[in-house]
Image (spheres, helix red, strand yellow):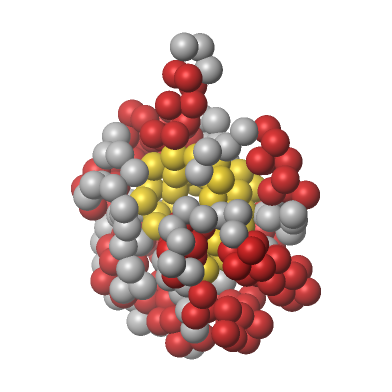
């Protein structure tokens, strides 16, 4: 069990960061500072081959490589797991049906599971050398679902009851969620704050870990996130962290 899954299972705070630029070197640098690093293939220009190199660099630094897939798509989920991702972030999850698609795509059909993931030699199992060991544990790879649209809130309680069985945590996608309210980036509006309160309340009532991406982090925003009982916390992106560092001395 990797540290990300262990901490979420124990309802502990786990802190990582987000990468959108195709750079294994940068992935390695940031991996030495965070418990997990998310390689973002939904936005940015990272391709599959570079993602595999980034996963290797992250693992070499003792961090957990996770991938945000471009979409809830079984081919993308299979290929990124085969390439070495040890966790998944699934964007724009709005229903129980969406969750069951994730379950089918990420799990092997072993021991009567609901999975449909195909078997094959790949980076994740050392091209067959560690085949048996990998498939024995692969069905336990952590999954974080993203709540990014107001439509998800219509049956959020039902969605999270299902997610608690099959996934490890959820997280808010702040820009898309505010965009679904016709105000992208409007994080201080009453409508956005109301949805956040509802999200945190339902998550805590069901004891299902919730998360947030703090795009421009500072000590105060991190304290607020912890106080709000977020457990899966993404701190910035490589671009925002670099810009903030530069501005701190100019």
Residue 243 location (% of width, % of height): 43, 26
Image quadrant for the N terminus? bottom right
Q: Residue furthest top?
A: 250
Residue at figure coordinates x 74%, y 54% from the top left: 228
Can residue 206 be seen here? The reply is: yes
Residue 20 location (% of width, % of height): 34, 44
Using residue 41 as the reference point, say whether residue 148 is left or right of it.
right
Quarter holding residue 187: bottom right
Q: Is residue 230 above or below residue 147?
A: above
Is residue 111 or residue 218 the one in the foreground? 218
Using residue 193 as the reference point, say whether residue 32 is left or right of it.
left
Residue at figure coordinates x 44%, y 39% from the top left: 237
Residue 173 location (% of width, % of height): 49, 60
Using residue 117 as the reference point, say whether residue 5 is left or right of it.
right
Residue at figure coordinates x 57%, y 85% from the top left: 154
Residue 11 location (% of width, % of height): 73, 58
Quarter holding residue 134: bottom left
- The mark total stands at 0
Residue at figure coordinates x 30%, y 39% from the top left: 21
Is residue 160 or residue 54 the one in the foreground? 160
Q: Is residue 154 above or below residue 58?
A: below
Q: Is residue 136 above or below residue 38?
A: below
Q: Is residue 157 above or below residue 26?
A: below
Quarter holding residue 92: bottom left
Can residue 110 be seen here? The reply is: no
């Amino acid at each position: 069990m990797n540290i990300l899954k262990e901490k979420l299972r124990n309802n502990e705070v786990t802190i990582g960061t987000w990468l959108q630029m195709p750079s294994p070197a940068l992935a390695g640098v940031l991996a030495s500072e965070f418990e997990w690093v998310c390689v973002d293939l939904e936005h940015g220009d990272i391709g599959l081959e570079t993602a595999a190199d980034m996963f290797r660099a992250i693992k070499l630094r003792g961090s957990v490589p996770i991938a945000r897939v471009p979409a809830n798509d079984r081919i993308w989920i299979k290929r990124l797991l085969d390439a070495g991702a040890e966790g998944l972030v699934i964007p724009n999850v709005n229903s129980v049906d969406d969750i069951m698609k994730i379950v089918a795509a990420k799990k092997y059909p072993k021991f009567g599971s609901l999975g449909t993931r195909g078997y094959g030699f790949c980076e994740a199992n050392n091209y067959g050398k560690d085949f048996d060991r990998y498939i024995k544990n692969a069905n336990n790879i952590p999954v974080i679902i993203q709540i990014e649209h107001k439509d998800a809130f219509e049956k959020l309680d039902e969605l999270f009851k299902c997610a608690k069985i099959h996934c490890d945590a959820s997280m808010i996608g702040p820009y898309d969620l505010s965009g679904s309210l016709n105000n992208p980036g409007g994080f201080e509006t009453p409508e956005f704050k109301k949805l956040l309160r509802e999200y945190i309340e339902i998550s805590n009532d069901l004891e299902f870990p919730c998360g947030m991406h703090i795009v421009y982090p500072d000590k105060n925003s991190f304290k607020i996130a912890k106080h709000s009982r977020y457990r899966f916390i993404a701190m910035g992106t490589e671009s925002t962290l670099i810009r903030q560092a530069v501005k701190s001395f100019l």
